[in-house]
């Protein structure tokens, strides 16, 4: 009987922010920055507000705690193969906030130059509704999908359970959820139609040699 091996898996890590007080502090910092700079910047966002990438400066203690959480998650999922007992690398964080209301979305993109990307949800904007018509899912794109499409678009790979593999995987956000994935993984956000306001924080973690390893 033929042996099937599953190769090159893609990690996607889901955790929860435990401090409601911390989530409230993040919300307040973002609302204050939004009021100060209502224009923001435009990168992958379609509508909505995208802050500058200096949230570590204006986000206060809660932002620093969130970055520590993200770096801890990254450490548990990463190994320096030339120094397995103690990694020679640390993380340089870059973070920003996104605020979305009805009809806003993010187009497919990835984060070159980073190793891990993290998204934390301060408010999912659903106001307790589980209606799938509200959209706003984080969409993850199979990196092999373009090659599949170029050959035979009606053929699909079978997964370990014998079911058809999805080309796109939706993740429905939840207030307090924090997710992490490799920065090369293309991702988007479907148009959001919730009655509330979606508030999220994105973090890029760039690996850098620690000072003692630069000599």
Image: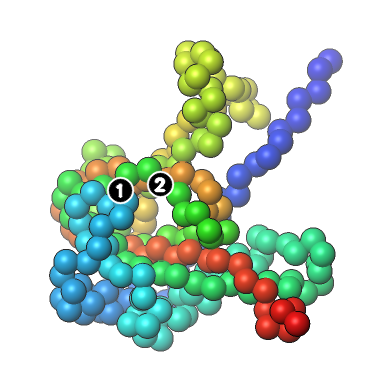
Drawn side of residue 46 relative to residue 1, left or right: left
Name the quadrant of the N terminus.
top right
Question: Tag on residue 35?
Answer: none
Question: Tag on residue 106?
Answer: 1
Name the quadrant of the C terminus.
bottom right
Taking the spot 53% from the left edge, 49% from the top edge, the residue there is: 184
Per the image, label 2 sits on a secondary structure element best described as strand
Taking the spot 68% from the left edge, 79% from the top edge, the residue there is: 210
Disc nearest the viewer among 1 and 2: 2
Taking the spot 15% from the left edge, 76% from the top edge, the residue there is: 35
Q: Is residue 148 above or below residue 85?
A: above
Q: Is residue 119 above or below residue 159?
A: below
Drawn side of residue 159 relative to residue 80, left or right: left
Residue placed most toward the observer, 19 or 145? 145
Q: Can I make out residue 123 in this image? A: no
Q: Is residue 10 above or below residue 52?
A: above
Q: Which residue is mark 2?
A: 109
């Amino acid at each position: 009987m033929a042996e099937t091996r599953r190769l090159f898996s893609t990690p996607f890590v889901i955790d929860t922010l435990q401090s409601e007080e911390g989530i409230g502090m993040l919300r307040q910092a973002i609302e204050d920055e939004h009021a100060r700079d209502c224009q923001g910047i435009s990168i992958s966002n379609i509508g909505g507000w995208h802050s500058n990438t200096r949230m570590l400066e204006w986000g206060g203690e809660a932002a620093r705690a969130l970055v520590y959480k993200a770096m801890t998650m990254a450490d548990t999922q990463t190994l320096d193969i030339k120094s397995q007992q103690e990694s020679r690398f640390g993380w340089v964080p870059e973070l920003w906030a996104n605020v979305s209301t009805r009809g806003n979305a993010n187009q497919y993109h990835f984060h070159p130059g980073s190793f891990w990307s993290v998204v934390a949800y301060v408010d999912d904007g659903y106001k307790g509704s589980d209606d799938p018509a509200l959209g706003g899912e984080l969409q993850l794109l199979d990196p092999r999908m373009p090659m599949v499409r170029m050959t035979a678009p009606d053929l699909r790979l079978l997964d370990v359970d014998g079911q058809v593999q999805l080309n796109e995987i939706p993740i429905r956000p939840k207030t307090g959820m924090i997710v992490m994935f490799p920065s090369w993984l293309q991702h988007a956000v479907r148009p959001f139609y919730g009655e509330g306001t979606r508030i999220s924080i994105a973090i890029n973690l760039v690996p850098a040699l620690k000072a003692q390893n630069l000599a």
